[in-house]
Image (cartoon, rainbow, N blue to C red):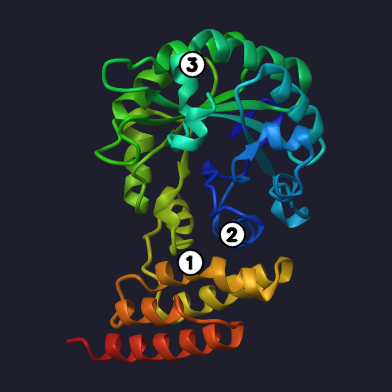
Amino acid sequence: MKIKSLHIKHNILLAPMAGITDLSCRLLMRPFGIGLAFTEMVSANGLVLGGDATKGLLASEPADRPLGIQLFGENPVTLAEACRQVETQGELIDLNIGCPVKKVVRSGAGSALMQTPKRVAQILAAMRRATTLPLTVKIRSGWDSSSINFLEIAHIAEQEGVDAITLHPRTRSQGFSGKADWSHIGELKRRATIPVIGSGDIFDAEDAQRMLKETGCDAVMIGRGCYGNPWLAKNILALQQGASALTPSVDDRREVALRHIAIFLRYNSERKTVLDMRKHLCWYAKGLAGAAQFRVHINQASSIDEMRSLILHFFQHAAMATTEDP
């Protein structure tokens, strides 16, 4: 796949997810077949005002490339300046026009922009002037069911020089409830002259194959489906190449869980690692015997050594239970 001058090896993209797709998560996921990964949402206001926490979201290294930097904000001048500040730190810049979180929406950013097409045009024009990098947008179907305007927003994006569009076909009012309407992705693909990336409800490799076939989109963006499941990208690739999707073994899950901790600890304190890794470890355990009890214990763990001990004990017993199943 190609977005402007950027060549992407695989048409599988890792979505920008706040609190999830930090550097350690991206480094863990990339070997499984991710063609392009994105930072967590980065506040343009935070960057321009010089916030250290915001700048920390841009942390990367050579193995974490190609990297898309997703910005959010509501002010064209501020977003243009943010583009200039991050231009050397990634290969692509993305504008978030889809986040449904109340705090973001109240500021006029994220999916609130679906209600203000003229502001979208002003923002994208300013960003386009500010950077030579590939510029993309991530949008929703609309604000609510009575204002489905993704085609209008996408047309504006094309006119202002955007190089690709990602559509998550839910409205802002839906959040992540209900079902993503993939027909919107197909409709956008038929109308657009730039690459279209489909997002929403890809939880297994077969979902990705169906989305590509039904909508004709150029790439898929995986999000919640890869929680505790980096094998999702690997299985999508396998199906594309005519092979079969494989279910990771209990040992596979254990090794990835331990690797994730090790990578996270490389860039963060032990305290932050313990707190932030809890959710990931619960996801790695999902569906296995004893997972509920493991979640209780892992959320009470206070050190890395305790976490590792709990992981080894849990997955050993889970493997035994799997072997004993008829």
What's the distance in space between the residues labelled 1 and 2, CA to CA?
10 Å
Disc 3 residue type (three-letter): Ala
Residue placed under numbered mark 1 in the picture: 280
Q: Secondary structure at mark 2?
A: helix
Instruction: For mark 3, give the secondary structure.
Output: helix
- Tell me: 125 left or right of 50: left
Nearer to us in this view, 300 or 265: 300
Pointers 1 and 2 in contact (C-beta within 8 Å): yes
Q: Quick check: 279 left or right of 268?
A: left
Q: Is residue 111 above or below residue 20?
A: above
Give yes or no for contact between labels 1 and 3 (Cβ–Cβ under 8 Å).
no
**In which quarter of the view is residue 216 placed?**
top left
Q: Earlier in the sequence, mark 1 or mark 2?
A: 2
Image spot of residue 16 (x, y percent): 55, 44
Measured from the top left, where is residue 168 in percent x and y?
41, 33
Q: Which residue is mark 3?
A: 154
Q: CA distance from mark 3 to mark 2?
A: 30 Å
Note whether residue 161 is visible.
no
70, above or below 119, in the image: below
Which residue type does callout 2 highlight?
Cys
Which quadrant of the view contains residue 158? top right
> Does residue 75 appear anywhere in the picture?
yes
The dot on residue 25 is: 2
